[in-house]
Image (tube, rainbow, N blue to C red):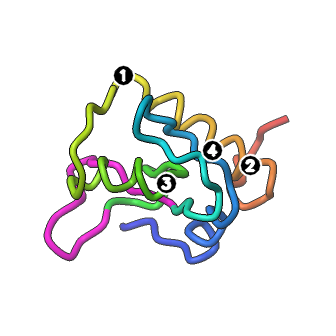
Amino acid sequence: MRVSSKKLRASANGQECTVRMPGICNHNPETTVLAHLPCGQKGMGMKGFDTVAVYACSACHDVIDGRAVGDIDWQDMPRAIAETHEGLIRAGILIVKGAA
């Protein structure tokens, strides 16, 4: 089952970039999209799950997708995922059953 949600993708509009690659990030919320991270579900014409994605400005997104050169600190991506999920939970888009 592939997790795909227009509401999740649209939630990125106007959000701060959670990736914030030093020397790359443009810090412009107007360019932020839900950027899918490589997780074995990606391929030509195929995106990964919308839940394995981060809010990324256009510059960080270009590096993640390989359209631009830059060093990605993959150890920092769990933080970016957590910040993205926190925003989705606050907005009521991502709901965790049983959470207090």
Magenta region, residue range: 34-47
Q: What is the C-alpha distance between the residues marked 3 and 1?
A: 18 Å
**Could you say where residue 13 lies in the image, as x and y percent from the top left?**
65, 67
Look at mark 3 in the image and give the residue it sits on.
51
Q: What is the C-alpha distance between the residues marked 2 and 1?
A: 23 Å
Label whose residue precedes the other's in the sequence (4 or 1): 1
Q: Which mark is residue 75?
A: 1
Q: Closer to us: mark 2 or mark 1? A: 1
Q: What is the C-alpha distance between the residues marked 4 and 3?
A: 8 Å
Which class describes the residues within 10 Å of circle 1: few (<14), some (14-19), or many (20+)?
few
Look at mark 2 in the image and give the residue it sits on.
89
The residue positioned 74% from the left and 49% from the top of the image is 89
**Could you say where residue 91 lies in the image, as x and y percent from the top left?**
80, 56
Look at mark 4 in the image and give the residue it sits on.
85
The residue positioned 26% from the left and 31% from the top of the image is 71
Q: Quadrant of the C terminus?
A: top right
Decide: marks 2, 4 in contact (CB < 8 A)? Answer: yes
